[in-house]
Amino acid sequence: MAKEKKVEQITDMEVDFAQWYTDICRKAELIEYASVKGFTILRPYGYAIWENIQRIMDGEFKKTGHVNVAMPVLIPESLLKKEGELVEGFAPECAWVTHGGSEELEERLAFRPTSETMFCDHWSNILHSYRELPMLYNQWCSVIRWEKTTRPFLRSREFWWQEGHTLHETAEEAIAETEQQLNCYADFCENVLAMPVVKGRKTDKEKFAGAEATYTIECMMKDRKALQSATSHYFGDKFSRAYDVTFTGRDNKQQYPFQTSWGSTTRLIGAVIMTHGDNNGLVLPPQIAPIQIIVLPIAQHKPGVLEGATALKERLETAGFRVKMDDSDNSMGWKCAEYEMKGVPLRVECGPRDLENGQCVLVRRNDGEKTIVKLEDLEAAAAEQLKLVHDGMYEKAKQNLEEHTYEAHSLEEAKALQQEHGGFIKTMWCGELECELKMKEQAGMTSRCMPLVQEHLDDVCPICGKKAEKMIYWGVAY
Amino acid sequence: MAKEKKVEQITDMEVDFAQWYTDICRKAELIEYASVKGFTILRPYGYAIWENIQRIMDGEFKKTGHVNVAMPVLIPESLLKKEGELVEGFAPECAWVTHGGSEELEERLAFRPTSETMFCDHWSNILHSYRELPMLYNQWCSVIRWEKTTRPFLRSREFWWQEGHTLHETAEEAIAETEQQLNCYADFCENVLAMPVVKGRKTDKEKFAGAEATYTIECMMKDRKALQSATSHYFGDKFSRAYDVTFTGRDNKQQYPFQTSWGSTTRLIGAVIMTHGDNNGLVLPPQIAPIQIIVLPIAQHKPGVLEGATALKERLETAGFRVKMDDSDNSMGWKCAEYEMKGVPLRVECGPRDLENGQCVLVRRNDGEKTIVKLEDLEAAAAEQLKLVHDGMYEKAKQNLEEHTYEAHSLEEAKALQQEHGGFIKTMWCGELECELKMKEQAGMTSRCMPLVQEHLDDVCPICGKKAEKMIYWGVAY
């Protein structure tokens, strides 16, 4: 009674981008909804992508001296409340534990929405001398923020992330750390996820609750909406003062250390889907793909084919690639569609004639390009093709970003450009909240960031007409 | 104003074992208490040990086809209550979320104490056919159990663990999985943690809430108390029926799959401390040691010493060891004590005369043995010494286990042996709960397990005098 499983159709992105996105999340088996509203399950294929992201990113963090720790998940309300801005920003989104076992707690405990408070509380106990600085900590965990509306990977009540928290002797060192980690994220997005980014600073309105400065990397999705993909915050000594974190300085006096935090989340998987995916499904950057190469034997019942394909698979595995061979009874058409849906970067096809001729065919997921390869060159050719996949994906995404970044000199022009093309609209900005709010009200765009690489477009703010020295990016954001 | 940090004294284990244990946890900087009662912080050095455990164990799980997933951390009370025994066992220990943001929830949510219910709920949505079986899932996460009394690593309200959950077509396959994973834990303890184990089956009284059978590995600590170090459970189709998990079988009929779960936790770090530690501090098995080799230059201000030591350090790093060099101003005595406290398995000492003679000294942490090594042989000698550290630690722990496992033929004898020597007392057992309770009441011992390797000690139960076919281990447990 073997029923052939059919690859189910997904909605075209041009027809309904949101539905296309959800279809990929479900049909590539990345995610499933849980029976708790607003919560999701990361399925094996989705989690394997996250494991690859974690492994590579964690290695980068460690190269610059960061170490991992594990902090308690529950935060007493009184501890959370010590820093006013932070609690204002996060308390409305906290999940509260009020009972432990059968007893009602004297004080309710928040499931961590972020852990600045816990790190500060810990540091206030263990930090003594400038000799112990810097403290460069990170943790991988999940957090809860009780969002009203949720979408897989982009916004869910629980999500998985890393949160870096560091303490420094001087403001300069802390600012350098904030920048270093922003660059670390940007490099990761470009070199690992094949996603170009715009690096910049958030406005006061958009910055993290309690931060002195928030830096961000902003990516453009295929529907030309913006996705904030990671952030890095500089806190000055604000939290140190609120949580009484001090150390004995070189001058033998008590001082407050300077602090940063920086985070990235499973949202990066959503960014990958919407940056690279197409109407056949997911397109995965080779470095995070759970399966990098799928080997498909053609006419596998003919003598020698399965043995030949198996040998190729084993050679590729030995060379260090993540490889799978599918010798199931499903049709070749089904298999091609299935692994396209799953976003496998490279397909190796080999049939009886190929093997006879000492060759096989490599097919790239991102552009469908086929290359005939001599069997003896397989490993080198696979490595080269995977590099071409990455580079091709990056170039295409970069083209999307560049083609849809527009310059405007009036609010009306900005609005018209956004309505016609979407994308990022760059203008000058006077720095006033009022103008930022006006752009939101009248053109439906929020500020994305003030790019680190500034351009002089004009002398005045296009919204109020006053003097403006900063260029800013606007967009419609997820 | 450089103050030399002194290595603080720890309590001798013979004086106060519990205090000795706590001293190591704190002074080796493994753990710190959090401001939430019963919760702990895994500090960088403690977390690095856990990362090594995770990496190696996860690799073993994957070799046998297991994949990782992430399930939501909150479980609706109604879902938790579907299986009666499980909820009875865990509900009294749950932390309950009652508010999300500012709204009171319609139904309260438990922070997962264990995730059988979530996995079953998920499987009931995604499982269709026998072709999808087995499902071999695992997740790394933290859980909360609202314990009344807590101790670092051994029992805390939040702890970090892995929980494997698998579904199988037949009971035989599920039983084989249960056994395979028990053996996986036992091999890990012996080959990685240098801890010998007793493998066995738990009595009905001691088994996991809801399981048909629970298997355990029991280790003996240096104070001769027992520590349950990992468990593996067979559920039959009980949860499948409770959560309506079904699949279409080979006969085209709806069937209930058979299930297992298995877990190990940060408690393993507590086991390592109490199995191998001594009055100078921690003694770490080389495979999980964050620093495997500490290089200490002697008379480092003499010409050539620091360069020579740095070269050795770099060679060892290149060879793949985890190495640190300490060229701080602290005295040699302080440094030796510090890295002994931290349990670093191997110390490399090199002074001006050593370097002149083309040699250095390797000192093993576990037994203090010194070996003079020619510089050209360094890498091979270090590998050999680390193997000797592991083997020496294992042999010593095995000796402790074997010397303190006693045979008894009456309840009185069992009690006297425990009082005089501690350790494991083996007897026959009739299988009745009444006798198990009597042993607890009168001799203060709980059943540890019915070892998989049985011996025939006698024909009758030493407690009731009735016929007995099973040998059982008793002990005082953590």
Image (cartoon, coloured by chain):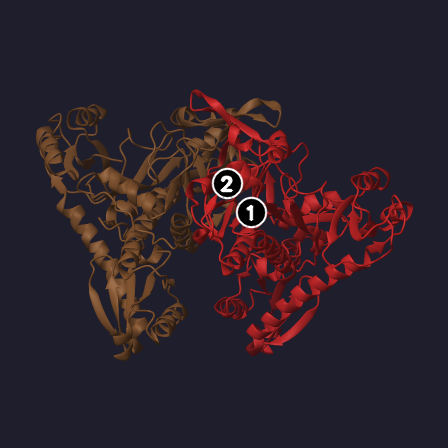
Chain colours: A red, B brown
- Residue A95 appears anywhere in the view: yes
The x and y percentages for residue A427 are 83, 51
Which residue is depicted at the point 27% across and 55% down?
A: B337
Q: Where the C terminus of chain A falls, by quadrant?
A: top right
Q: Going by the image, does A226 lie left or right of A320?
A: right
Figure check: B96 above or below B372: above
Name the one closer to the observer, B316 or B348.
B348
Categorize mark 1 by other alpha carbons within 10 Å: few (<14), some (14-19), many (20+): many
Q: Is residue B182 above or below residue A83?
A: below
* Neighbours of disc 2 within 10 Å: few (<14), some (14-19), many (20+): many
Name the residue at 55% across, 69% down.
A305
The part of the image, by quadrant, that contains residue A374 is bottom right
Cβ–Cβ under 8 Å for marks 2 and 1:
yes
Q: Callout 2: helix, strand or loop?
A: helix
Q: Which residue is mark 2?
A: A120
Horizontal side, residue B174 vs residue B221: left or right: right
Residue A243 image point, x, y percent: 51, 37
Query: Which residue has dot 1 on it?
Result: A259
- Please determine whether, in this image, residue A440 is positioned above or below residue A317: above
